[in-house]
Amino acid sequence: MSNTIQEPRTGSVPTAAGRRRPNTTLIVIYLSLGGLSFAVLQSLVAPALATIGRDLSVSTSDASWILTAYLLSAAVLTPIFGRLGDMVGKRRILIVVLSLLLVGTLLAALAPNLGVLIAGRALQGAAGAILPLSIGVVRDELPRDKVGVTIGLLSAIFGIGAGVGIVAAGPIVENLSWHWLFWLPAILIVIALVGVIFGMPESPVKKPGRLDLVGAGILSVSLVSLLLAISEGENWGWGDGKTLGLLALGAVALVVFVVVELRVKEPLIDMRLMKIRGVWTAHVVALVFGFAMFGTFVLVPTLLQLPTATGYGFGESVSSAGLFLLPTVLMMIVAGPVAGILVRKTGPKPPMLLGAVFVTAAFILPAIDHSQLWQVVVSGILTGAGIGLALASTSNAIIESVPATQTGEAISVNTIARTIGSSVGTAVIAALISSHSSAQGLPLDDAFTIGFWACAGVAVLAIVGALLAPSMRQRRAQALALGVDDFPADAPAR
């Protein structure tokens, strides 16, 4: 890694002859719209699964493949497209993934049956590399003093988009139809795609080479096996042979992948990056926050929509329950850029730790008592602040720890960690609710108490990960050793 050749970062030096300085504000807008579209589509469908299932005359179990196909595709293709972006150019691959996202969204909007809808969702999931590619573009094109804040914004947008999807799903389905869950994001995708095509230059920072097809195949087997088992475990049974077999296959394939990647000349993912403390701690925090984020997206709306006759539900509709997540979304919008500013001044560790503490407190509060609406709202505010701070910090931590030519693959692994965390969080909380329900199928109060405590316990792992992250002084020494050229030169040593 230390002998990796890097080209100059054009965003922080005078532009090369014959290359116009790009409009960085417009670039950030296009990247934000693309990221927002992908994130919204990830969560927008979840609240409408029952409605879509009824309309297409399929069971809820079959309809769940609408989510599963999206997650599987994103997990498998994110590292591949991230690596291709490092190899052939981030703008070129961004155009590819945004085009796939648009085609998949249009296909889903027009889907006459479940099969076509699942195919459209798989194409949408292929755009999972938008975040790593976007962060790579920002690192290459923007002035150094704007990189941290912008990456904070882009990272927070993935949490914001997921929240917006949960909030908007109810009103869209109730007032229009489920098809509009796809027509509306398609408008944003078109704007982002046109902007990237005509308003963004190709990045000069590349790492030419070959795509590791063997590694890609082994990683695909591992991720598909693990995510499929996690997603379908509740339906199949956690002790079922299919579930256990897939978990075992996924674990073995992951070990084989690591062995292969350490031996090939041009790996899909440079496993040596995992030895860097600033990288692996960021992945741990991302995994935990994926769990926490989707844990709250399952627990809070379910609690709010339960009838008041239960003695602990609040009797809200799907639409009004979603509105209670607005404070969470708004805090993400604020906290993401704030994290970028803090990273510039203190390094990623303090805001990452602060975010982990906020999210832990956000779950402890309703775990102790969730009988009042203000407790749910305060929990949401703390959750939004914590997610915004931590996710922005993890992305910044990674770009400060790896060479510019490996930004795509490093951020891709972080995105996969978050995706796996989201899948595990959704599955675990759904299983808790299912196993603590009345004879009529209504979740018991204990389901929420246990669920909130479970999320709080997992969030503590993020605190541990953040505490283990390197300090500013350690990052500076590591960056110099690895040849990372965009570590903040004016940052204080801490």
Image (spheres, helix red, strand yellow):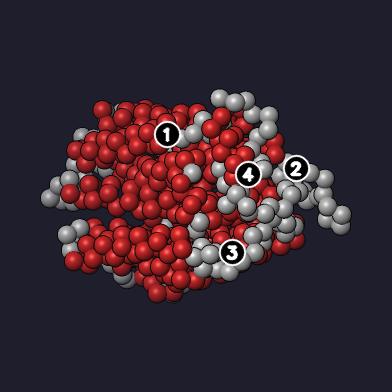
Q: Is residue 352 left or right of residue 147?
A: left
**Nearest-to-viewer mark from 1 and 3:** 1
Count of numbered badges drawn on the protein: 4
Mark 2 Cα within 10 Å, few/some/many (few <14, many 20+)? some
- What's the CA distance linking mark 3 and mark 2? 24 Å
The numbered disc on residue 84 is 3
Q: Which element carries disc 1, helix, strand or loop?
A: helix
Give the percent coordinates (x, y) of residue 452: 29, 37
Q: Earlier in the sequence, mark 4 or mark 2?
A: 2
Q: Earlier in the sequence, mark 2 or mark 1?
A: 2
On screen, residue 252 above or below 431: below
Q: Which residue is mark 2?
A: 12
- What's the CA distance linking mark 3 and mark 4? 20 Å
Identity, as a three-letter code, of the amino acid under mark 4: Val
Q: Earlier in the sequence, mark 3 or mark 2?
A: 2
Q: Nearer the viewer, residue 207 or 66?
A: 207
**Nearest-to-viewer mark from 2 and 1:** 1
Q: Which element carries disc 2, helix, strand or loop?
A: loop
The numbered disc on residue 484 is 4
On screen, residue 92 above or below 473: below
Q: Which element carries disc 3, helix, strand or loop?
A: helix
- What's the CA distance linking mark 1 and mark 4? 21 Å
Give the percent coordinates (x, y) of residue 139: 66, 47
- Label 3–label 4 contact, CB within 8 A: no
Q: Which residue is mark 1?
A: 468
Q: Earlier in the sequence, mark 1 or mark 4?
A: 1
